[in-house]
Amino acid sequence: KNQVEQSPQSLIILEGKNCTLQCNYTVSPFSNLRWYKQDTGRGPVSLTIMTFSENTKSNGRYTATLDADTKQSSLHITASQLSDSASYICVVSAGAGTALIFGKGTTLSVSS
Amino acid sequence: NAGVTQTPKFQVLKTGQSMTLQCAQDMNHEYMSWYRQDPGMGLRLIHYSVGAGITDQGEVPNGYNVSRSTTEDFPLRLLSAAPSQTSVYFCASTPARHITYTEAFFGQGTRLTVV
């Protein structure tokens, strides 16, 4: 069964600190992996999208990595800000067609 | 461009009532889809459309109907609302015919409560 598992479920960090969110997937055939940020009460917004051949992709203070062999991805947030408080969702595309497999998300709280 | 616009933002329905959630996009995207988001669960696909006149079922289609008469609009109809349909609903669009290949843009969501 296609699944996307994220850890931790929630995380609290101090402003200015770094953090790393994890995503493990069992999706076949793999097409690409995306990270979305979802602010409370808003729709998901794309941070990065990586294909099979990409190992790292950055978007400002956000850096995503992908290891297609171990089927793991991580999202590293550098020098966190209060505005980073949100849910971060890992999404894997399964082959050709219509399937996006969503993780349950990691809720990040950045405190001052 | 407004992107993906959903209306209403909030709605309370009584069990058995029907209603339509509206979704419109002004990016000329081919692919549009509806998801529901429930606490502790990932987004789940309800229905999708790869172009005007074409719709298909997703993972959780029961109790919902859709139509795609134009490229811009993709309304979701609840036929007879049930408490189990209490959820947050998101509409998404993508420029390609298949969502797996290109970026998806989400609306702001409709929070629906069925009492």
Image (tube, grey):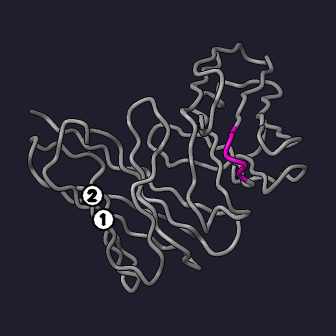
Residue B29 against residue B73 in the figure, above or below: below
**Magenta-drawn stretch, dominant element (helix, strand or loop):** loop
Q: Is residue B102 above or below residue A44?
A: below
- For residue A5, side relative to residue B32 (left or right): left
Q: Which residues are magenta?
A: B25-29
Residue A11 % position (x, y): 21, 46
Q: Which residue is mark 1?
A: A58
Count of marks placed on residues: 2
In front of the other: B69 or B27: B27
Q: Amino acid at mark 1?
A: Ser
B24 drawn magenta: no
In the image: residue A10, left or right of residue B82 = left
Q: Residue at x 44, y 29 (%)?
A: A41
Q: Element under label 2? A: strand
Farthest residue in the front direction?
Answer: B1
Give the x, y percent position of residue A17: 9, 50
Q: Residue at x 34, y 79 (%)?
A: A55
C-alpha gap between disc 2 and disc 1: 6 Å
Identify the residue under disc 2: A62
Residue A1's tag is none
- Marks 2, 1 in one chain: yes
x and y percentages locating residue A52 in the rendered image: 47, 81
- Rendering coords of residue B20 (x, y %): 77, 25
Residue A21 vs B112, above or below: the answer is: below
Callout 2 crowding tier (Cα within 10 Å): few <14, some 14–19, many ≥20? some
Query: Is residue B85 or residue A40 the one in the foreground?
Result: A40
Q: Is residue A56 left or right of residue A102?
A: left
Kindly indicate the quadrant of the structure image that contains residue A97.
bottom right
